[in-house]
Image (cartoon, rainbow, N blue to C red):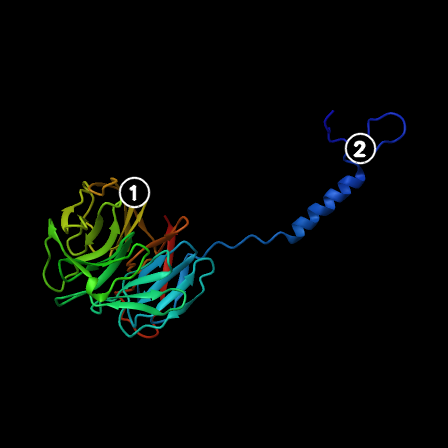
Amino acid sequence: MGYTGQLTDRTEGPHVPHPLSRRRLLTLGTATLGALAIAPHAQAAPPTSIALPNGWQPEGITIGAGPYAYLGSLADGSLYRADLRTGTGKVISTGPGTPAVGLKLDARGRLFVAARSYGARVVDARSGETLATYALATATPTFANDVVLTPRAAWFTESYQPVLYGLPLGRNGELPDAADVVRLPLTGDWAQTADGAINANGIARTPDGSALLVVQAGVGLLHRVDPGTGVTTVVDLGDAAPLTNGDGLLLRGRTLYVVQNRQNAIDVFALAPDGRTGVFRRRITDPAFDVPTTVAAYGGRLYLPNARFTTTPTSDTTYSVTAVDA
């Protein structure tokens, strides 16, 4: 017969200890109390705002497999690592005095950093050591703006010229020589606007990995780019509003997040696998947005640095990263 919950032994005659006798219950109770005593306190929810050093002037953000975000400084190119669990952080690499714009972290712990008119550099995220620098442009003006990583290359957007720059990677991730930089002219539907306007900005891969996606900020178009030929086609987003001031792109599965900096918003699209078409799903806004520029994800959250381009930067200007639900 199973235990009925009664503490009284039903056996007739001399007392026979029940499988759950008082002694056993006392032992179980003591163990339970001990477990409660050593159980850790419930962890606090991760912060929704992460303070950056005063005067930082953030633009790019990247997050790897762990709960750490890496952010570059437009002021001097320094790199900062923030703990997403606590909001604390530290400078991991002192900049060379040139801007750090978009950046991406690879699985080998290397940060690929777009450096505006100074090309690109690759930095060891653990030691802060600069592993390589690259002159990307062959024409001026030049603005290396953002970067995306594929299995065999790092692709950088150029905001002032109709071209993408590629750093081909070796079979085991070896970095290329300076002479191996690829310069891919953009053709097809791409129509470069006047000098001084921001053209190519954020960049991502298509869901199936067959092509690249580049947002043309000034005209609000999303382009699909063949990385082998440079031929572009405008992505059909239906009746969605133009992606004016489109900045950082983030692809998760078939969901594309497009940051629109001056609108303080993220537009969310469901893409076809090949990236040729998409459907608008929703817009994410938050009162804490202050000209967010790029976006990275960890868990169920999106993290965006507030570049505060409408605020005159000083060494005392405050900057932060805002987290919102994805």
- For residue 3, which numbered disc appears in the image? none
Regarding residue 288, the answer to whether it shows in the image is no
| Amino acid tagged 2 | His
**239 relative to 179, above or below:** above
Residue 47 in the image: x percent, y percent? 44, 57
| Amino acid tagged 1 | Arg
Residue denoted by label 1: 254
Label 2: how many Cα within 10 Å (few below 14, some 14–19, many 20+): some
Q: Nearer the viewer, residue 189 or 172?
A: 172
Task: Please tell me in which quadrant of the rendered image residue 156 appears.
Answer: bottom left
Regarding residue 319, the answer to whether it shows in the image is yes
Residue at the far right in the pictured view: 14
Element class at badge 1: loop
Residue denoted by label 2: 18
Q: Which badge, 1 or 2, comes first in the chain's sequence? A: 2
Element class at badge 2: loop
Residue 89 in the image: x percent, y percent? 43, 65
Q: Is residue 96 left or right of residue 224?
A: right
Residue at the far front in the pictured view: 171
**315 relative to 245, above or below:** below
Q: Quadrant of the N terminus?
A: top right
Label 1: how many Cα within 10 Å (few below 14, some 14–19, many 20+): some
